[in-house]
């Protein structure tokens, strides 16, 4: 079985503040988990969730595609990888592949 059982990419285009909205949610205490990440393919990124589900193999990484638009890569690890792999590392890889795909047009 693969590293993950589910991966989703979703654009967060309803809020024109891009990644700033994630920082605001963190500052307001609305997130159970928040971590600044190194840039993903040169774009700013954070890992975040309302509830920290990393021990269950779930992580969401949000990447700032522009000042107004962000997208999230959400990963659920396969059962065989829960506790063995970091779901946020896998989510960063998925987000990086999405950025590369978007850049290629």
Image (cartoon, rainbow, N blue to C red):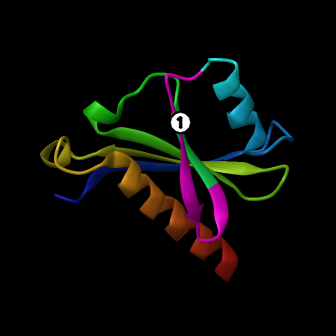
**In the picture provided, is 31 more to the left or to the right than 4?**
right
- Quadrant where the C terminus sits is bottom right
**Percent coordinates x, y for residue 32 in the rendering:** 49, 22
Residue 66 image-quadrant placement? bottom right
**In the picture provided, is 29 more to the left or to the right than 21?**
left
Q: Considering depth in this image, is 9 or 91 the residue closer to the camera?
A: 91
Q: Considering depth in this image, is 64 or 79 the residue closer to the camera?
A: 64
Please say if 28 is above or below 82.
above
Residue in view at x 61 percent, y 53 percent: 45
Regarding mark 1 in the picture, which secondary structure is present there? strand
Q: Is residue 34 magenta?
A: yes
Residue in view at x 25 percent, y 57 percent: 3
- Quadrant where the N terminus sits is bottom left
Residue for badge 1:
48
**In the picture provided, is 77 more to the left or to the right than 46?**
left
Residue found at the far bottom of this picture: 104
Q: Main secondary structure of the magenta part?
A: strand
**Percent coordinates x, y for residue 16 in the rendering:** 86, 41
**Percent coordinates x, y for residue 97 in the rendering:** 51, 69
Label 1 Cα neighbours within 10 Å, binned few <14 / some 14-19 / many ≥20: many
Residue numbers of the magenta segment: 31-44
**Percent coordinates x, y for residue 49 in the rendering:** 51, 30
Q: Considering depth in this image, is 37 or 81 the residue closer to the camera?
A: 37
Please say if 105 is above or below 47.
below
Q: Is residue 74 magenta?
A: no
Residue in view at x 73 percent, y 45 percent: 19
Please tell me how many numbered marks the rendered image carries. Answer: 1
């Amino acid at each position: 079985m693969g590293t993950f059982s589910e991966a989703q990419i979703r654009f967060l285009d309803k809020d024109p503040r891009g990644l700033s909205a994630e920082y605001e949610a963190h500052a307001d205490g609305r997130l159970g988990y928040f971590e600044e990440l190194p840039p993903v393919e040169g774009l700013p990124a954070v890992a975040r969730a309302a509830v920290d589900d990393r021990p269950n193999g779930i992580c969401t990484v949000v990447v700032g595609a522009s000042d107004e638009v962000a997208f999230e890569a959400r990963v659920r690890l396969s059962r065989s990888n829960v506790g063995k792999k970091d779901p946020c590392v896998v989510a960063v890889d998925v987000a990086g592949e999405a950025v590369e795909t978007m850049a290629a047009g």
